[in-house]
Image (tube, helix red, strand yellow):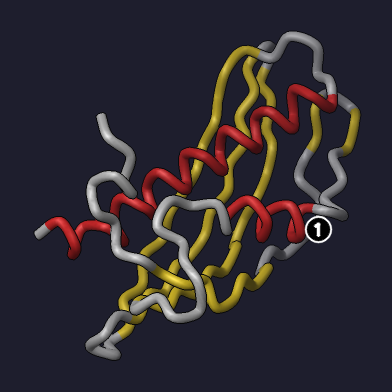
Amino acid sequence: MPSPTAQGACSFHIEAVDDQRESGGLGATGITRIGGEHFTRWFKEGIATTPGHGGASAPMRVRIAVTKAYFQTLYSLKAANIVVKVTATGVTGVPTQKMYRGVDSSTQWTASQAEVQSAFEGALADLQRQIAADLGAPCRS
């Protein structure tokens, strides 16, 4: 399947990313707390690589509010979740809003920092696929 950019995704500009999470922490794996001190910076850098993201002259303006980001474990399973509210304003000037949940779940092998990081990267990639597909839909019509 071609990437959203190859399919003619609309160019958009991320005007702002707001962290609206109630807590700065990201959960726990076993008894180890997962701090989220650098989450906002990591998320902003990562979301800017979404297919279709262009410069300030892009016709569509996007604001992203991170409402939740957390890591969960249950026995040998793990899941990372990132929930965002995206507000997009196109050439008509009428904003549209949609909630997205990026998820990565798999078997937890070592409960290591690398495993947690990999899960959040998977959740971000899932989120990017969804957002790029929706923002690119008007250009494919």
**Residue 43 vs residue 59, the one in the foreground:** 59
| Quadrant housing the C terminus | bottom left
Measuring 53% from the left and 53% from the top, which residue is drawn there? Answer: 83
Secondary element at image label 1:
loop
Measuring 24% from the left and 54% from the top, which residue is drawn there? Answer: 8
Measuring 19% from the left and 62% from the top, which residue is drawn there? Answer: 139
Q: State the residue position of label 1.
A: 24
Residue 7 coordinates in the image, percent (x, y): 23, 47
**Residue 98 vs residue 12, the one in the foreground:** 12
In this image, 5 relative to 8: left or right? Answer: right
Q: Quadrant of residue 90?
A: bottom left
Measuring 73% from the left and 52% from the top, which residue is drawn there? Answer: 42
Residue 93 coordinates in the image, percent (x, y): 29, 90
Residue 116 coordinates in the image, percent (x, y): 74, 29
Specify the farthest residue to the left. 141
Amino acid found under the numbered disc labelled 1: Gly
**Residue 43 vs residue 100, the one in the foreground:** 43
| Quadrant housing the N terminus | top left
At label 1, counting other C-alpha atoms closer than 10 Å, the crowd grade (few under 14, some 14-19, many 20 or more) is some
In this image, 22 relative to 89: left or right? Answer: right
